[in-house]
Image (spheres, rainbow, N blue to C red):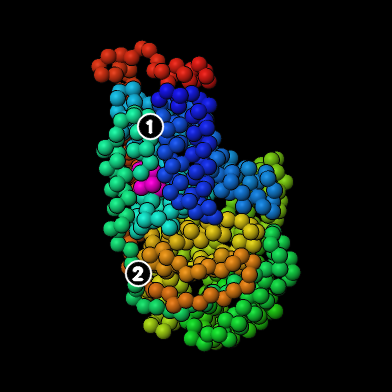
Amino acid sequence: MGVISRLPVRLALALVGGLCLWLSFPDHDLALMAVVGVALIGIAMWDVTARVGALLGLVAGLGCFVPTLSWSGIFVGTFPWMALAVTESLYVAAMGAVLAAVQRPLLRRGHPLPAALLVPVMWVLQEWVRGTLPYGGFPWARIAFSQADTPFARWAAVGGAPLITLAVALVAVPLVLVVVTRRPPWVALGLAVAATAGAFVVPVPTSGDASARVGLVQGNVPRAGLDFNAERRKVLDNHVVGTERLAERHDDLDLVIWPENSSDIDPLRNPDAAAQVQRALEAAGVPVIVGAILDEPAPAVSNASLYYRPGGGEPERYVKQHPVPFAEYVPHRDFYRLFSSKVDLVRVGFAKGDRNAAFTVPGRDGDFSAVPTICFEVAYDGLMRSAVKDAEAKGDPSLLVVQTNNATFGYTAESTQQYAISRIRAIEHGRSVAHVSTVGVSGFVNPDGSTTPTTELFTAAQPVDDVVLRSGLTLSDRLGPWVEWACGLGLLVAVGWRLRHRATGSVGGEPRTDPSPTEQTEEATTGA
């Protein structure tokens, strides 16, 4: 590998690779830079020790997550932002260590192709673990979520977000091999072509079983930031007024959807808030889904989606099942207070819901289900999959509803990054998505991932669309997390192969006693 074997060069490649991943996400939207990023990181980690692999992974992770997650510190300061970015980077560091440990023995025995194929395997597994542990994980900024505008997105219908990540990383493999081996990697090139061309033949639905006219109300807030709801009832009033304006222009709606936190007062316990919701319901003349904070179960609160029908009665509800740690509740508060007093900004914790919901809406073409998801829940594969499958069991066509509140992230890319996730979910589950925010961006996503024009940030708006309603399950829904399991199996095979050959310490039947040139370079440079 020549000059690439030098540690400073490897560190530079890892950093630039991480920055390329950042550029692939909204608002930069240079999606194919993800391929370049994975390739550069793979080249940097080629034939290194586990310790150096961990260092390179940390650098690559920081290059990606520090800028990509900058929205997380826009109002709470640098420390929480850096803490989140470093934590996410540690997963990439662990990936680098494991990759080096299982890849290097293959290289010692002259198997560069299997060694290179471990790169996409490890990316999938890293994202899996990062989206699971601890506290349920934080599956943001996955490679898949940068690909909504590329053909790779179509793989979501077969294997969800993990298959998109696998395909993108697989395309990077021949780039890695051509640099490190200086020979045409024909087999790897064939796999990359298959990963790209195959996406074009994945069937993605464009039509459905029925349609419904749905209105979204983006009411806006008095101000951006943590005190977006400081003026009592103002956020609720904005959404009531928005609903009245919507009703003035459209008298043929089937459903109106408000975003998360659109009722900044508990409408089940406060008569003034209840009266305002009733006012909006009478204006719309159709069911309204309201995002509300409920003062229960004491001393906690609940982030809920409430389904109101014209004519009165208790609303149906969905309670957010995955509150965001350190934002909606603080685990082990006393411990984390040692590092930052910011944890006390979360004064009251949010309770966890224990079930999915599917609200039955009487539409023009018959009943359909509106399946609510609240804010960051859209990023969790298993939660979305179970919600879709439960709705399918009811037998009606369905619409996915994503209610969010981006007011606490200001004019950042958080809102567009989240909307890109909704686009991937639409393809993955073959469903339209109604994505509505208090402040934007809001819009409608078709089952093929295409989208209507989205609203502007911090602007009141009431978009309307005739959405496609579909039933049935995609392959991804039916097969579940098969990509992660397949990659896990691939890693186990590599580990087993390493353990089997570890005792012999041989290459081609002869013991190796001298370090490789790369090992010599690392030992001289880092003492590895």
Q: Give percent across and percent down for residue 284.
A: 56, 84
Q: Residue at x 49, y 83 (%)?
A: 253
Residue type at mark 2 is Thr
Residue 151 in the image: above or below residue 176 = below
Q: Is residue 177 magenta?
A: no
Q: Secondary structure at mark 1?
A: helix
Q: Is residue 122 left or right of residue 456?
A: left
Confirm whether residue 502 shows in the render. yes
Q: Disc number at residue 206?
A: 2
Query: Which numbered mark, 2 or 1, is in the foreground of this view?
Result: 1
Residues 387 and 11: in front is 11
Q: Mark 1 is on which residue type?
A: Val
Disc 1 crowd, CA 10 A, few/some/many (<14, 14-19, 20+): some
Q: Magenta residues, as a range?
A: 165-170
Q: Is residue 78 left or right of residue 158?
A: right
Q: Residue at x 53, y 67 (%)?
A: 454
The picture quadrant where one finds residue 227 is bottom right
Dominant SS in magenta = helix
The location of residue 263, given as percent across then percent down, is 64, 72
Q: Is residue 291 visible?
A: no
Please tell me which residue lies in front, 358 or 153. Answer: 153
> Can you say which quadrant of the picture contains the N terminus?
top left
The residue at 33%/22% (across/down) is 108
Residue 479: mark? none
Measuring from the top left, give residue 92's x and y in whole percent.
49, 38
**Residue lying furthest top in this view?**
513
Identify the residue under disc 1: 179
Q: Residue 369 sits in which quadrant?
A: bottom left
